[in-house]
Image (cartoon, rainbow, N blue to C red):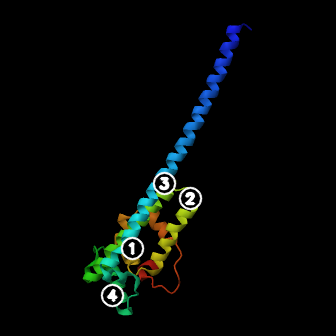
Amino acid sequence: MTTFELIQAIVGTLSAIALVATLAAMAVQMMSDRNLREYQLFQHLAQEYTELLWRPAENPCLNKIWHPLDAQRIAELDGALDELADKQRWPVWAILDGDEHQCYRLTRAGLELFEQAHTGFYNGWVSDDQTWQKWENWMVDWKRTNTFVTYVLAENAPWFTNRFLKYFQQLPVPSDQHTPKRQQA
């Protein structure tokens, strides 16, 4: 082997090592960028969720979403869901009063945020199990305590992804919570 061939072999080996090192550095950078994007996404969603939760401080009637309805009102809303089965649009919305309309809208906004978080999780944008567990716990809490969730989901199902609806429906719910008859089937 001549000196020229030896230098050529060394340069070729060094080039290969440099290429591998460059690719490894790019992979590390890409992982770091992905983690940053995940963090930014869920920080943004968490900020929106926090702002949503503070709306009742500005408008106390919104706290009604956490108060159980009386049996007569439940019967009225469940009866309206029967009209939904008959293809009438927005039958629950039609019988709500002004404060209930605001509670319905707040509930819808919360569910939209949960759907966005679920989409991020489903698409693999969240690699941290603790972050996802926090969002899932919030969803379970809303499903457990928010008076309007079942009615909003029933009337707005076409505007949510089927994947999110299936996921949300399979979340646990305590046996002492009222479930509208339309969702019991």
- 125 relative to 93, above or below: above
Residues at marks 3 and 1, CA–CA distance in whole angstroms: 22 Å
What SS does tag 4 mark? helix
N-terminal of the pair, mark 3 or mark 1, is 3
What SS does tag 1 mark? helix
Instruction: Choose between 178 and 31: the one closer to the eye.
Output: 31
Residues at marks 3 and 4, CA–CA distance in whole angstroms: 43 Å
The residue tagged 2 is 128
Circle 3 or circle 4, nearest the eye: 3
Label drawn at residue 53 = 1
Residues at marks 1 and 4, CA–CA distance in whole angstroms: 27 Å
- 45 relative to 30, above or below: below
Q: Please name the amino acid that badge 3 sits on.
A: Glu
Check contact, mark 3 vs mark 2: CB within 8 A: yes
Q: Please name the amino acid that badge 2 sits on.
A: Asp
N-terminal of the pair, mark 4 or mark 2, is 4
Instruction: Choose between 168 and 4: the one closer to the eye.
Output: 4
Quadrant of the image occupied by residue 41: bottom left
Q: Please name the amino acid that badge 1 sits on.
A: Leu
Expressed as whole percent of the image width and height from the top left, the position of residue 17 reads: 64, 27
The residue tagged 4 is 76
Circle 4 or circle 2, nearest the eye: 2
N-terminal of the pair, mark 1 or mark 4, is 1
The residue tagged 3 is 38
Instruction: Choose between 37 and 98: the one closer to the eye.
Output: 37
Instruction: Choose between 69 and 44: the one closer to the eye.
Output: 44
N-terminal of the pair, mark 3 or mark 2, is 3
What SS does tag 2 mark? loop
Quadrant of the image occupied by residue 97: bottom left
Q: Please name the amino acid that badge 4 sits on.
A: Glu
What SS does tag 3 mark? helix
